[in-house]
Amino acid sequence: MNCVLLRHGIAGEREEWDGHDEERPLTERGTKRVSQVGAGLLWLEVKPTYIFSSQLVRAIETADILQASLSIPSAVKRVDELLPDANPERLLALFRDLPPECCVLCVGHEPHLGLAASVMLAGKPSTAFPFKKAGACLIELPSPPKIGRGVLRWWLEPGQLRALGKKRAKLEA
């Protein structure tokens, strides 16, 4: 099983937002950059069969953009296991019922995604794996998924993913 962990795109500033933090949306720039990241994921031939998202608006918006740009066949599934304060080990439990040959794209938040990556790769939560907004990694997991048994295939900053997307666009032009 392949697992792509991706942090949501650029959202409005918390200090400038009048509503509940859960409802804070992507900015126009964040929306554009997530689309460019999606093109980069296409260049990498990432083909998710499932897409999971935190229930926070900025993550849902990110997931919706990626579902469209990557032509993901399943609907975006909103899960508590990707909320910012969720136990990172619970995310692995969510994968247990998925087919071993699938690719799941998980859209969430920091520090949760970094902690989840460290649990998958090193077996314990660590802050040593931070994600920038719209940054992503691909971790190959055994079947069934086990703590500390993941293999890191790539870890890319958002600028790197956008550059790959631009390269793809030039080749298609």
Image (tube, grey):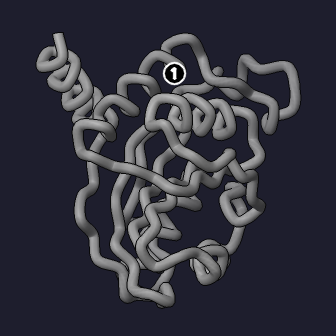
Image quadrant occupied by the N terminus: bottom left
Q: Nearer the viewer, residue 171 or 84?
A: 171
Return the x and y of residue 82 as percentages of the image width and height.
66, 59
Up/down of 61 relative to 109, above or below: above
User: Residue at left 54%, top 30%?
Assistant: 68
Residue 64 relative to residue 160: left or right: right
Task: Say which residue label 1 marks.
Answer: 30
User: Residue at left 74%, top 59%?
Assistant: 79
Is residue 80 in sight in this rendering? Answer: yes
Up/down of 52 relative to 15, above or below: below
Is residue 89 in sight in this rendering? Answer: no
Up/down of 97 relative to 144, above or below: above
* Crowd tier of the residue under label 1, counting other residues whose Cα lies within 10 Å: few below 14, some 14–19, many 20 or above: many
Q: Nearer the viewer, residue 20 or 77?
A: 77
User: Residue at left 37%, top 31%?
Assistant: 37
Image quadrant occupied by the C terminus: top left
Residue 58 relative to residue 35: left or right: right
User: Residue at left 52%, top 43%?
Assistant: 72
Q: Give amino acid for label 1.
A: Gly
Return the x and y of residue 59 as percentages of the image width and height.
64, 39
* Disc 1 element: helix
Return the x and y of residue 100 as percentages of the image width and height.
46, 79
